[in-house]
Image (spheres, rainbow, N blue to C red):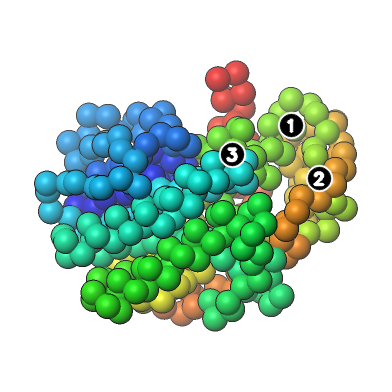
Amino acid sequence: MRVLVTGGAGFLGSHLCDRLLAEGHTVVAMDNLVTGNTDNIAHLAGNPRFSFVKHDITNYIYLASDLDAILHFASPASPVDYLELPIQTLKVGSLGTHNALGVAKAKKARLLLASTSEVYGDPLVHPQTEEYWGNVNPIGPRGVYDEAKRFAEAITMAYQRYHGVETRIVRIFNTYGPRMRLNDGRVVPNFIKQALNGEPLTVYGAGNQTRSFCYVSDLVDGIYRLLLSDEPLPTNIGNPTEMTILQFAERINALTGNPGGIIYEPLPKDDPQQRRPDITKARRILGWEPQVGLDAGLEETIRYFSTRLDK
């Protein structure tokens, strides 16, 4: 296949480029580099089946060549980013998704939308199944990301139903691994950076809020299987093993030998108290479930971050 990956220089987008190329496909990565980084795809330079286009997809997308698939992963994705870039986040989720769907329609290509567990908001149902509609504050500080993704799902389904565009939607839960940014603002890089510097880890609230963490290679495998599947409705991809943030902080300190301990800060507004995917559907239709254990994934991630501290 010939595949366009929007957000292709980002954390997930770059790993998807690697997987697609490894499967023998031709890849065009597109990114405006607001949160992406060409360092993530530098190792692909010179690959005859890979090309990079610097472009903001909230503007009209032009590609002369045919396409078989589009993986739409362009968007700020951490609270630090979308709180600093609220308008850009809303625009890429709305205008950017509209433009990507327009390309899919014109090229008769399949589009896979990167949605998020944030569409469930601070959930009242646990674990979260794909049938749950969510509990989102549309005017809260996180609403710029949550509602951008909810709109993106809605317009993707509209293009599927009205225009007959082949679409897939993945709802991504917390994912970690090499190529995350140290200043990303999410819990994994925050904790690892603090631990490697010998600092206390900052836990918000009492640390009783729960998360589940999926290693990036597992997530990419699930996304690739979904792309090739016949499933048109949203599908959760994530690790169902749940732990509290306090337990996670203690695990990071143990793996890094950090003597700094833990400090506590007030809980941010609208921070979800529980987050765990129900992956029954992914198991059934994709034959997928996570393979990488938490310690093994964290050790790889810690090794990566240890090489980036001074950069």
Disc with the residue nearer the chain's start (2 vs 1)? 1
Q: Is residue 9 above or below residue 132?
A: above
Do the numbered discs 3 and 2 sit on residues whose CB atoms are within 8 Å?
no
Q: Who's the residue at 17% across and 55% down the image?
A: 67
Please name whichever residue, 171 or 96, is drawn nearer the observer in this view of the structure: 96
How far from the left and from the top, in percent, is residue 33? Answer: 41, 34
Secondary structure at badge 1 equals: helix
Return the mark for residue 84. Answer: 3
Residue that sits furthest to the top in the current view: 310
Q: Which mark is residue 203?
A: 2
- Left-right relation of 250 to 77: right
Figure label count? 3
Residue 258 vs 111, above or below: the answer is above
Label 1 vs label 3, nearer the camera: 3
**Which of label 3 and label 2 is nearer to you?**
3
Query: Residue 225, can we see it?
Result: no
Residue at the image position 57 percent from the left and 60 percent from the top? 146
Mark 1 crowd level (few <14, some 14–19, many ≥20, 10 Å Cα): some
Callout 3 secondary element: helix
Q: Amino acid at mark 2?
A: Val
Q: CA distance from mark 2 to mark 1?
A: 11 Å
Q: How far is disc 3 from disc 2 in space, using C-alphas?
A: 21 Å
Amino acid marked by disc 1? Gln
Looking at this view, is 115 or 106 the one in front?
106
Q: Quadrant of residue 129?
A: bottom right
Res 140 seen here: yes
Res 124 → quadrant: bottom right
